[in-house]
Amino acid sequence: MTAMAIRLRVPRRRAPTSAARYYNGRPYGEMLLAKPNYSFEKRQRELAKKKQQEEKDERKRQAREAEKAAADTESKTSPDEN
């Protein structure tokens, strides 16, 4: 057999991929979905709850003060008769 008759098939080596073309193991061309930030959402819920509770406490405090003021003025206008 001649050298021309035997042809060995040698697999071609792929060129090494550069790291600049990849991000998180994916090619840059692929669409990456945004990950939800659960800690931010939780913090926003906590802040909303806290604000709502503070508003409720403020309304209660104003109602108590108004009730107390009304009771004070009533006791001053009607003297005790013994």
Image (spheres, rainbow, N blue to C red):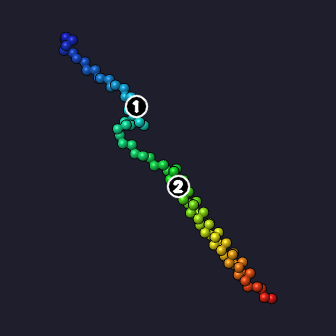
Quick one: 47 or 11, which is closer to the camera? 47
In primary-sequence order, the first of circles 1 and 2 is 1
User: Image point 19% across, 13% down: which residue?
Assistant: 4
Q: What is the quadrant of the N terminus in the image?
A: top left
Residue 7: horizontal and vertical position, in percent?
22, 17
Q: Residue furthest front?
A: 77
Q: Please name the amino acid that badge 2 sits on.
A: Gln
Q: Position of residue 71 (x, y in %)?
A: 70, 78
Q: What is the three-letter code of the residue carrying label 1?
A: Ala
Q: Is residue 22 left or right of residue 76?
A: left
How many C-alpha atoms fall within 10 Å of the one at disc 2: few (<14), some, or many (≥20)? few
Where's the C terminus, which quadrant?
A: bottom right
**On the rendered structure, is 61 left or right of 2?**
right
What residue sits 70% from the left and 81% below the top? 74
Q: Are marks 1 and 2 in contact (CB under 8 Å)?
A: no
- In the rendered structure, find residue 20 and report the number of the disc placed on it: 1
> Are there few (<14), some (14-19), or many (20+) residues within 10 Å of tag 1?
few
- Mark 1 and mark 2: span between their CA atoms? 36 Å
Give me the disc on residue 41: none
Q: Residue furthest bottom?
A: 82
* Position of residue 81 measured from the top left corner of the image (x, y, whole percent): 78, 88
Q: Is residue 81 above or below residue 69?
A: below
Q: Secondary structure at mark 1?
A: helix
31 to 11, vertically: above or below = below
User: For the view shown, which residue lies furthest in the top direction?
Assistant: 2
Residue 71 placement, left or right of 26:
right
Dividing the picture into quarters, in which one does residue 11 lie? top left
Residue 44: mark: 2
Q: Residue at x 51, y 51 (%)?
A: 40
Looking at the image, residue 58 lies above or below residue 35: below
